[in-house]
Every structure is written in C-alpha cells, then in structure tokens.
Image (tube, coloured by chain):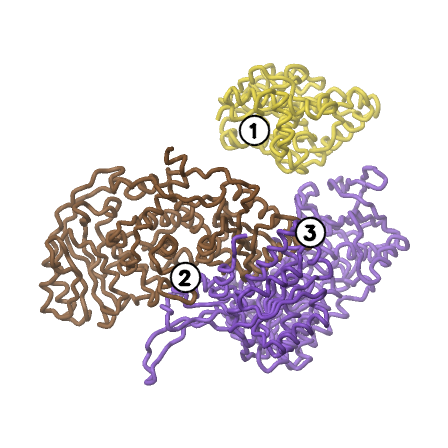
Chain colours: A yellow, B brown, C purple
Amino acid sequence: MSVAFYPGCSLHGTGNDYAQSAHAVCQRLGLDLTELEGWTCCGSTPAHNTSALLSVALSAQNLRLASDQQRDSLVVACAACFNRLRSARHEMAHDEVLRGRVEHVLEAPAPLDVRVDHLLELLLDTYGLDALAARVRRPLTGLKVACYYGCLLVRPPEVMAFDDAEHPTSMDRVLAACGAETVDWPGKTECCGANLSLSRSDIVVSLVDRLLDQAKRAGADVVAVACPLCQANLDVRQTDVTAQTGHRYDLPAVYFTQLVGLALGAGADELGLDKSFVDSRPTLAGWLS
Amino acid sequence: MSTETLLTPSAPDTATWKPRLVAFVCNWCTYTGADLAGTSRTEYPANVRIVRLPCSGRIDPHFIIRAFEQGADGVLVSGCHPGDCHYTAGNYHARRKFMVLHALAEFLGIEPERLQFSWVSAAEGRKWADVVSDVVAGLLRVGPVQPTWGGAGELPVRSLSEPPRPVPEPLDVVGELRATAQRWLSDCRVDVFVGYGQGSLPGRLRPAFITSPDEVDQLVWNEHAVNNLATYLTRGLVKRHGRVGLLVKSCDARAVVGLLQERQIEREQVTLLGVPCIGVEVDGALAPKCHTCDSAWPALVDEVLSAEVPLTPVDGEGLAAEIAWVEKMSPAQRRAWWQAQFDRCLRCYACRAVCPLCYCSQCIADQSRPQWVSKSSDGRGNLAWNLVRAFHLAGRCVGCGECTRVCPSNIRLDLLNAKLAQVVRDEFGYVAGGDPDLPPPLTTYLLEDHEEFIR
Amino acid sequence: MARIGVFICHCGENIARNVDVDRVAEAAAQIPGVAHAESYRYMCSDPGQRKIREAIVAQGLTGIVVAACSPHMHENTFQNAVEGAGLNRYLCEMANLREHCSWVHSDREEATSKALELIAIMVEKVKRNQPLAPIRVPMTKRALVIGGGIAGIQAALDIANAGRDVVLVEREPSIGGHMAQLSETFPTLDCSQCIMTPRMVEVKNHPRIQLYTYAEVEAVDGYVGNFTVTIRRRARSVDESKCTGCGACTQRCPQKKIASEFDAGMGQRPAIFIPFAQAVPNLPVIDRTRCTMFLKGKCGLCAKACPAGCIDYEQTDTLVTEEVGAIVMATGFDVQPPTLYPEYGSDPDIINGLQFERLLSASGPTAGEPRRPSNGEVPRSVVFVACAGSRDPARGVPYCSSICCMYTAKHALLYKHKVHDGQAYVFYMDIRAAGKNYDAFVHRVIAEEGAQYLRGRVSRIYRDGDQLVVRGADTLSGTALTIRADLVVLATAVTPRPGSDALAQKLSVPYDAFGFASEAHPKLRPVETNTAGVFLAGTCQAPRDIPDTVAQAGGCAAKVLALFSADQLEREPVVSRVNEATCVACFDCERVCPFHAPEHRELRNRAGDLLRVVSHINEGVCAGCGLCVVTCRSHSIDLAGFSDEQTFAEIGALAPF
C-alpha cells in the first residue's frame, strides 16, 4: 500500500512538534510518510463556514493529487484536516450532484478511490499493535495518560466511522501497546473550545479547566492529544485558567506521537518536547535517556 | 452488411411499439405491494400483466418460457424479501432456481433486460412501480425480440485449446473382470452383472447383461467402453432381475451417486465393480470428458480391478475453453448460435434415453395437459425442450457426456450442462456426483446465497 | 361447455374514471366461453352480489370472474356470494381492475385495454378451475403453552378453564416469569406478587394443566391439530416426588454467593436453591455449573442435610412426548444489560429497570428499600434514563420498547414514596403513555410526586468519588446539565428471550430482524402465525405491557378454543396433490417442503405386496406454497387453485397489447 502524508497548515505551524514526532515515529517503524506533493488547504473551518462547495472542492483537490500520485491512502495527523477530507469524500460518494459540481470546479474527476486514514488508524490497522509493541524500546511503564480525542476525530459518527464515537479507545490501545497506563476518564470526547480560543477565550478557559480537572482527578500524569488545536487550548490556556479560576494544574498536553516516539527510543529534541508551554520533560524525565 | 450489424437490433420506434411485460409474482408480498402502489396511486407503465401465484417458489421456469413463447418481450419475477416468505423458505429455494435460470438465459444470449428478478415487499408499492418502470425502460432500450438467423458459425469442434489426443492403450483387466463377475454370480451376490460386450461393428462395444456364471466370457474391456452403464440401473430391463452388479468407470460411478441421492436405487441393491480407466474413445480421439478427468479410480465401489495405472496429468481446460468461446459472443450472436444448434433437434429424445439421471416414468415432454413443451420439432418446441432438459439437469449432471455423444444432430448439449455445472459449483459450492449424503443443490439453500441479480 | 359470467365493478368512480367499463363489458361478452357480462356501480354491495347470484341461477353459469378490486380485499365476499347461489366458491376468480389498473394508469385508453385483458386472463383461468371442498382432518384437542410467564399462565388457565387439557412448559425452575419479579404495577400500583402468585398456584393445582418446569421444547413435528412435541425435562438433581420444599438443603450449601437470576443480580443464592419463596413448584434445583459436587466431585452437604433423601446427583435429563393440537408461544422478553453504552461505563450503581424492580420489591434482597449496590446506602438522588438502547438505530435497537415510559414513571413514584427527601430525575425523549389512565399517572408523578422530568439524552456518566456524575442535555431549556446521583437506572431496551428464535424455527414461525416472532397479519390476525395452529402471546411478538399481554393471551386461548370447537379441522383446499402413477419417488419434494408435508406412501397390491413407495402430501400440513410442484421434474405434483394448467391458460390468454 502506498500512502501520502497530508500535513495541513497546522503541522507546518503551531503543530510543528506534532509533525516532527509523527515523522520520528514513522521513521522508526519503517513507514514511509512522504508528504503529498503540492498539497493545498483542506477546506477547514473558514471554507466550510462560507461555501459548502469550496470546502468539498478543496479537499477533493487533495484527493485528486493523491490519486494522480498513485497513492492508495492519504494519511492525516491533524484531526480537523482528517475530518474535512473524510467528510468531503463521504459527501461526494453520497451526492452525485455535488460530485458533479466539484468536478466542474476542479475540471477533473474527483476520485473516490483514495482512502483517508488518520495516523492512529495507520498504527492500529495497517501497522498493527503487536508489531508496534515489538518495536518498543523504552516501555512507558508507570506513566498515566488521559487520552483526549476531542470532537473532530469521531464526529459525526456515520461520516467519520472512527472507533466508537462516544467512547473511543484507539489512542488508549496504541499507548497501552507502548506500555503506558491509560486512565478511564469522562473527558475523552468533550469539547476543548476549539477556535473560540481567540474570540471567546473565557469559554475555552472554563472548558479547559474542566477537562484538566477531570484528567487530574483520574490520576493522569499527562494528557495525550491527536489534534493541534486541542493541544494548543489545553497547553497554552493553562496560565489563563490559573489566572481566572485559581486552579493550577501543570498538566502537560502532549501529542500521542510524542509518547509513542518516546517509547520507540526517540529523544526529546527529535520529538519537539521543548515546544510546549507546560513543559512535559520533567514528567517524562524517567523515560528520556 | 456485416453479421454484427444485422444482429444489432435497430432502434425501436418507441412511439408505436409497446413492450409486453409479464410479471409472475407471489401473492403475499409483491402482489400486495402492487396493491399498495394502487392504493397510493403510484403511476407506472401499463405494459405489465401480473400473474398471481402463491409464492415465488411456485414460479415455474416453464411459465417463463411459455410467456416468451407467447410473445412477451420481457418477464419479471418477483417475490418476498429474504426472511419475509409467508411460507418461511419458498423464496430461498426460488432464489437458487432463479440463479440457475438467470445464468442459463444469459448463456443462451437472452438479453438480461428481458428476464428480471426482484424482491418487492407488501410495503413497497413505490418500489413495485419503480421496478416496473425500470424494466419497461430496459425493454424499450433493447427493443423487440429480433430474428437471429444467420448465426455466428460453428464452434470449432473440441479443438479450441488442445489438439485431439490419442487414446491410450487400455489396461489389461479383462481376466480379473470375468473372474469377479463369475464369482459374484456364482455366490448369488448379484442376479445380473452389467458390463460391456463385443458390439456388431469393429471398435464398438455394447452393454452386456450377464445372468449366469457361464456367460462371463462375453465380457470385454477396452478403450471403446464409453457408455455410461449406470443408466441401466433405473431401467426395467435390469431392475426386474433384482440385485445388480455394475461395472463402473470413475465417471459412471458419479452417476450412481446421483441415483442414490435421489433415492432411485438402494445402495444394497447394487454391487459396484470399479474399473481403472485411463481414457475412452469418441470419434477416434480421447473423449472430451477424459481431458479433465483427474482420477482413474472410481470413488464409490465395492470391489475394484487391479492394474498399474500410468500417471496421466490433467491437461487442458476441456469444455471450459469452449464455454468461454461461446460467452465471448455478443448476446445476439449467442442466441443465433444456439438457435442454429437447437434448430437441428429432431426431438428423438436420444439424449433423454441415454442419460442416467433422466429416469422419470413419464417425461413432461410427453404430457399434454398441460402441454409443457410443444411436441413439434420446430423452433418453439426445440427451444423449450432443450432449456427444460438443461434446467432439470442443473446440479445433477455428472458430465458423462453421453447425451452429446448420442445426439444424431451433434447439438452441444454438453456445453449447456457444463455451464450450469459451473454455476452450481461457483454459486453453491457443489459438484454433482460427489457425496451421496449431500442434498442436491436445488433442493436446499443457504441464507447467504448470492442475489446480486435480484433487484 | 364453460359458461362464464363476468361482473365488472365501477367501484363508484374508482375504476370507471379511468376504465371505460361499458366498453369492457361489451368486449368481455365476446370472449369465448363468456355467457354473461355486465357492469355495476358497487359489485360488493348487496344489490351487486344479488346480480351475481341471480345470473348464476338464471344463466346456469359455471364460473365467475369479478373484475373489481384486489382479491385481498374482497375475494372472500364474492366467494360467499357465489356459494350462496349454489356454485362452488372456488369457481370464482377476481380480475384486479382497481389496484393494478385504474389507480395506477392514467391513460384511459391503455387502462381500458389492459382491463379487458386482465379479465380475459381470469376467464381462461376460471374455465379450468375445479370445485374444491374444504379439507377435514382429525385433531388432538389439547394445547401446548410454551412459557410460564403471565402470558403463558393466562393462556393456559383460559384454555384449561374452558375444559381443554393444557401442557405448560417453562424453561426456568419456577413459573412466574418477569411479572413475579416486579414490585408494583402501573398505573394502579397493585402489588405484582399479590396478583401473580395466586395464578401460579391455580396453574399448579389445575386438574387440566400438566406443568413441566425446568424443561424445554426439544422438537416439534406434525401440523395443526396433530403436533407431536418432544420436551426435554432437565435434571433438577432433586427427586420431585419426595421433596417437601423444606429448604434444608439450600441452607447447608457452602456456595452462597452466586448472583441470583430472580433478583437480576441484586441478590445472591446458593448452588442448590429455590428461585424465590413463592416459586411454583416450590422445589429446589441444583445449578450444576456452580455446584461443588459437580465441579470438584465432592461436597454432598445438601444430600446430608435433606431429611427426605431426595438429592440425586445422578439424575439425568428425560425426554417426554406430548400430542397436542395447538401451540401458544409465550416465551417473553429480556431487558438489555445496563452496559450497552461504553460512555456510561459499568458501575455497580448503574443498573437497569428490572434490577431496580428487585430493589423496590418487598420480596427483594433489600426487602423493598432502595439501596445502592455499591455500599448499601439509601440513594438520595436517582437519575432515570429512558430509551437507554431503545429508539437508537445507531447503537441500540430502533424500536420503542413500549413499557419503559410507564415503568420509569412508576419507579420515580415508588422511589419518592420510599425516600421522601430523595430527588428523582428522569431523562426522556418523548413520554409515550398511551394506555388507559397512563397519561394521568405520569402527570401525577411529575406534578404530585415531584419527579423532575428532563427532555434530553444523557451523554456520559462517570464516577466522581462516592457519587456518579450524569451529564446530559435539557433540550427544552437548551442547557447542558450535570447532575450528581447516587444511583442511575437505565430503562434498557426490551429484547426477545434468548433462544426464542431457535424455538420459532422449530415451530416454522417467521421472526423479525430482532428475533420477535411475526404474526400472520399486523391488523387482522395479530395472534395467529403463518403456521396454522401456532399462536403468539405476549412479548415474544413485540414489547408490550401486562394488560395487553393478558388480553392477547386471552385472544390466543379464544383462537385455540375456536379451533377445538369443531369436530374436525377444516382448511383451505389450496394444497398440493401427487399423481401417484407418475411419481418416481425422488422425494425432492420432501427436501424442499418447509412444512414437512410430503410423506412416504406405500403402494401395495391386493395381496398386500409392496409395489412402490411414492410421495404423498399430507393435506393437513400442506400450506399450499407450491414449492414442491416446481421442484418435481416429472410434474407429478400439482397445486389446487393454482394448477399448472390454470397458469398456462392465463399465460396463453396474454394477447399482444
């Protein structure tokens, strides 16, 4: 199977550490994570708030590129890109008229033969947990992780068809294979406030406060995420949370790839562990050689 | 004008031509679904005539053939969805029969638009209207049934993938054969022994019915022993003697399995003497069935003659290559080709007489109330007869090839049989003549049987 | 010579609007064999039927085609009319000019010519119709009831009280079913046990009821009026004839911590146990999957404790055979476990409605006081979640479980009665309280008992310290809610009893995708099935409450008694018949028949020597599907009413149109 990696804008920007760690993981697993050549915007929130056609067409353009480059699957790390690409594919598959309009815009056929997979699915389904466990060099034994999936990975369930929409466990299984202890906590798919971060940061602060509180109560040492925006909100807003509520957590929010990379033997710099506001390195010191 | 153009139906004048569609439907689901289309005032083309039957399991392939004979342009067969049958399982059985019929129609070059299947429930008035509209639209597309004279030429006889192979020297088993028959008769283990005797012409054998140990010297064995002696098991000539000893090749033994399955013989009535066989002769060459035969040794025997059997690998595709050749033709060409074949049929029924599995005491071809098959040897009667014969053997024919060998008109009945055997093998995972304890494939069903051909 | 009468109905304007009925009548009169053709505004009305009867007598008609609506609508009406004029009712056919023609084709010309052709088809058919007589078969006037819950008990008592013998089979060690587990019943708050246990005793003491508990139906053979049923009596390991039910054995059993089925896991029982104090029969049974004697081969304490010496470790299952004429299937329901939604987690304080019933029941493990399974304390705040699995096509079942709205309201009420200062919250989607006095009951719970009803779904439940946190939505106020609860009760979906699908197969009764047995007609034959002589009572057919179940069980009893009221069984004569002269006895008919109607018949000469064995269709069993007819290669089988000749004649009448 030939895959192309779709980074999306975040992974070239604020989520740079996500990209870094994803590449580190895949390189250690021998998975080819070559970027899709000539990729463009996925359609994201700005596009699908303004034009339904544009949001689908932008994603379709990337699917077309992948098809032209003879890729079977487009692997995505950013939850928002993943949601857009998979939704666009779903909408085109179920709406001939829309597909026709998209093809008119693209002036090319909109291919449905390219799959859209999340990085988690790549590890779980394509690579396999047993194979992953076999490559673990520094098991994360004793590390308690609250896996946070957010909303975009799993919803809407009939479109995303990703795990159990209300009670996903794929990240838990991946990290458990790396030796970590994942905690059962109620916040898994709750909202982090997403892009209200700038316009209504008060809402984001209260949501993040609750998530961190729940994770902490569940005994987590770190929160693992699979979305650049979730990471940003959970990480950057912790000082605001303290300022507004007086609650102090110091709970690192890390990408799941950073933890997997750690288990596979990658170093802190290679994984971009220095990039977050709440430094995770003291917590993870025991596993950093 | 090329044959191809001639055979392509001209675009029908839709303004004047109205396709005639006959629908055979079950009483409980589709008929009621059509009622619902009425009560919901869902309009659909008036080209359809419904024949109501209790269950899709009651829809006889003969009805479909007769509808076409009567000038229908298309036939729609419709019943309850799987699981909904008023009679629990009628539609599951029907589905298997329709699968075979559908494949047979396609193989004969009947355009798929002309024979359509659907499941329409009592709640699906809308679907009924849609199905009828769709099927009528399909018929408008293919147009009226076109004449197909001037067919696609003759099939190169049995030489598509391999040259005729010489017949190997027969194994020397005659001594042991005679001794065994003598022993069985003397021990009163059998009342009659059926084997091969010298025929009236050189190179021909004929069946020998030995009832006394003194007569066993009449028995012979060589490469001309082509007849399938299992046929005689159900014939009065042999039956009235009582217990029968029968000489069987591996192919003949498969027919015995069929007769056991269908309870035409009791196992203890028959004592089987297996003869190792490395090929028999038809028309001066190795018989087609021997090309793909993979065992010299019959599977079902009581005793077996001993011989050193040289290793003869299975080679060639046998009939599969010829089936593929037929299937490569366009439907119209195929229809023309088969029409040319059936046109030669004399209705002598030699195929029926020689077939070990055609044992009915009164064949439907001889019945007149109702007349299932027109008795004249004309296009209509010949088509119906050959279709019915093939359908009745679906899942039962063991491929002995005797029907084709004895046909005075050289009609390729073996291709029809082999095609349906392929369908039965691929769809139902069943090969006739194997395990006598398995039910014949058209008397059973699986919930997960394929139904892609059903709307 | 056939003299066919054709009667064309205008159906008011329904047919006449799109079909030129006069022209059709004129043309129909010209069809060979038609002696009389006329049209009338309402053929099914009394004057219309009189026209048919008069024409039959006056013209000596030999067959009738009524061209009107669907035969599903009025075939019976016209068959009766024809019979009233002395003609056999099966010499009447209907051409469907309404549903299949005038209502679906707007082109009057096309519809008119199609109408005529539909009539011509039926004329050709009816010319070949044969007079048929109803089939009469003897029957055993004894009923089998499968399932000893309220449905089975009601059906059994109704049949037995009318003077017919009943065999009642119950899979569990005691009859009583779910109703015996309930606390109080809505909307009257009758104590369930108080109204149930007397009926159980009545069953036990009824001279006409043969009761088999701890038994299952193993096989069903035969057909309506003549079923042979094999019943497996599982080994109780207790000699029923000697046991007095003293209970000494159960007290001595060292295994005491087994989750009690009767208490839905809320209480415990030993390995040898009487399911509950009021059990019928009041006899213990050894659970061989948990008994030390069976697991480890030694113990025997119960045998030592038994004063009557009736513990029998060697006892084996026995098979008994019963002959019956009718069967009532009353296998009941189950509720889903409270762990369907992973986001609710699996916490001891999250239970389902049936478990809460046991906590509320005076005979339950807490003597009727609601207590938290986790710590035994009285819950101060309880959240009830309706539709926990029901009406959820994505993750649960798509159907409504029908009883949850009411029992949840009852739960809230009973809880408030027992814990006065407690708070009850009910999350619901809609309140479906369609029974008599039901809506008033729910309103009472909300207005007078102070249960807080919240319209919305629960998204997540998680434990926080000693309590559960329930997060959900109140869609009426548009707010997200977080409620701290001591106990959560999920109204999980009602499903058929496990194994009821396998039983339905033995009975040849179809069932839906969820396993609920299918009735013959949802409106007009709700207790009958497509297998003659098999009836459905209670929740094996669909979720329903006690009054509906009791009514349906009574309906079953009435159907059974009506069946038994005749001397012999009378059936529609649409059945297959074998031509013995041409049958070659391949018995493919036997292989395909879903009803086991084909039998082996021996043909003998006068001296009694066996000539041949041929197939013979048992008319009492044959349902008339015609599958055997098509399967028979020699066409030695034909189907009365839909014969080969009739069908060929219909096809032959198809003119180019």
**Could you tell whether C231 is left or right of C552 in the image?**
left
Tell me the distance, in whole angstroms, between the alpha carbons under discs 1 and 3: 39 Å
**Disc 1 + disc 3, Cβ < 8 Å:** no
- Does dot 2 land on a helix, a strand or a loop? loop
Tell whether B415 sits left or right of C239: left
Task: Say yes or no: labels 1 and 2 on the same chain.
Answer: no
The answer to whether residue B381 is above or below residue C476 is: below
**Residue C64 falls left or right of residue B263:** right
Residue to which mark 2 is pinned: B372
Q: Position of residue B155 (x, y in %)?
A: 29, 41
Do marks 3 and 2 share a chain? yes
Chain containing mark 2: B
In the image, what residue type sits under mark 3?
Arg
Q: Position of residue C95 (x, y in %)?
A: 60, 62
Q: Position of residue B315 (x, y in %)?
A: 25, 40
The image quadrant of residue B271 is bottom left
Single out the mark in the foreground, 1 or 2. Answer: 2
Q: How far is disc 3 from disc 2 in space, using C-alphas?
A: 38 Å
Residue named by callout 1: A112
Disc number lying in front (1 or 3): 3
**CA neighbours of label 3 inside 10 A, class few (<14), some (14 to 19), many (20+):** some
Question: Which element type, helix, strand or loop, lies under badge 1?
Answer: loop
Residue at coordinates 16% horizontally, 48% vertically from top-left?
Answer: B309
Mark 3 lies on residue: B41
Which element type, helix, strand or loop, lies under badge 3? Answer: loop
- Say if residue C307 shows up in the picture: no
Quarter occupied by residue B27? bottom right
